[in-house]
Amino acid sequence: MPHAESQESYVELSETELQETRRRLRTELATIAHWRRLIRARIDLTIAQATPPPQLGGYLQEFLSISPTMNSQLQDVSAQVLTAHTLYSVTDLPDLKRSELALTTYEKDVRTALMAVTDELVARQSA
């Protein structure tokens, strides 16, 4: 894909090159969205692990009869969810936030380029 800094540089591209550039920019936006979901999920998991909820059913035992099977299943939920992801630390949050900010800036640049390419295609088709 030709590197283009401004809308003027898109003028030199053929219509086929513009369409291919536009397709690649849209694909990159989808990739950015995926990375954004991963970063947000990692932030959510880090915060959730640092502040785990109370044990399920712990406050209801005097009001609700929980079968031994259900109690075991609830303990399994806790064990699987709270201990499976011990790789996350609150000390990672600043780096994750910086990654999120970098991704936001990059997304803005890609969207600006996509708009410029789209504008050039529209201008050619309306001429």
Image (tube, rainbow, N blue to C red):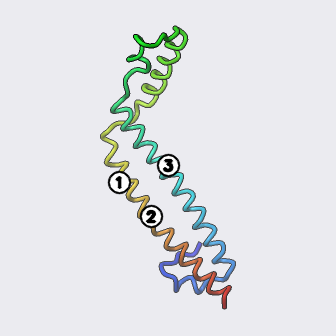
Judged left or right of residue 121, residue 77 is left
Where is residue 23 shown, x and y percent of the image?
A: 64, 68
Where is residue 99 shown, x and y percent of the image?
A: 39, 53
**SS under mark 1:** helix
Amino acid tagged 3: Arg
**SS under mark 3:** helix
Where is residue 57 shown, x and y percent of the image?
A: 43, 18
Q: Which residue is mark 3?
A: 37
Q: Quadrant of residue 100?
A: bottom left
Image: 46 above or below 34: above
Q: Which mark is residue 98?
A: 1
Depth order, front residue of 50/20: 50
For the residues carrying marks 2 and 3, which lies nearer the camera in this image? 3
Where is residue 53 shown, x and y percent of the image?
A: 38, 27
Q: Which mark is residue 114?
A: none
Q: Which residue is mark 2?
A: 106
Amino acid tagged 2: Tyr
Q: Which quadrant holds the C terminus?
A: bottom right
Judged left or right of residue 122, residue 86 is left
